[in-house]
Image: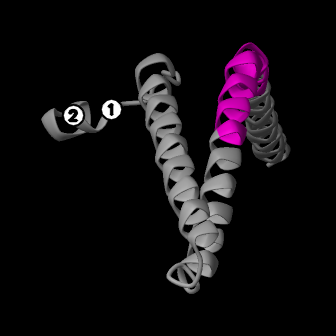
Amino acid sequence: MELFQALRKWEAAAREYNTIKNELNLEKACLNQMVKLESTLYDARPVVHDVTMRLGAMANVWAAIAADIRQIVYHSQSCGETRTSEKLFVQRVQRLEALYGCLSEALRYYQVTVWLPGARTLMESAIF
């Protein structure tokens, strides 16, 4: 009987040991993954910075376009009243056209030169 109880205690201790060992292995695996993730994120910092800078430039272009659209709407309401208003309206439209051209070039440049790790283009997504 004492031998049976000792065997049960030993088996319980062995199960507890294995449970703790498995938890330790899982924690080590998680830690290794975290180290790899940290390394990947650290390596990606220049790419992320570059992308955010480009997106910031595009946001500035969009803000300028929105401001010009508001100005055009305002000046178009009194466009027929004076010759000066008409010239101002034409200048605003030309400026807006130039800004759209700059935005189009920036977007094209961004699309061609910026490739995030693991990112797919729309064409690749459609194919695969």
Which quarter of the rendered picture does the C terminus lie within? top left
Q: The residue tagged with tag 2: helix, strand or loop?
A: helix
Residue pictured at 45% horizontal, 38% vertical: 101
The secondary structure making up most of the magenta span is helix
- Residue 82 lies in what quarter of the image? bottom right
17 is higher (above) or lower (below) than 78: above
Q: Are marks 2 and 1 in contact (CB under 8 Å)?
A: yes
The residue at which mark 1 appears reads as 121
| Residue 74 as seen in the image, left or right of residue 13 | left
The residue at which mark 2 appears reads as 123
Q: Position of residue 89 (x, y in %)?
A: 55, 65
Quote the CA–CA distance across marks 2 and 1: 5 Å
User: Which residue reaches farthest front?
Assistant: 83
Q: Position of residue 63 (x, y in %)?
A: 68, 56
Identify the magenta region: 32-57
Asked if residue 80 shows in the view, the reply is: yes
Q: Position of residue 12 (x, y in %)?
A: 78, 44
Crowd class of label 1 (few under 14; some 14 to 19; many from 20; radius 10 Å): few
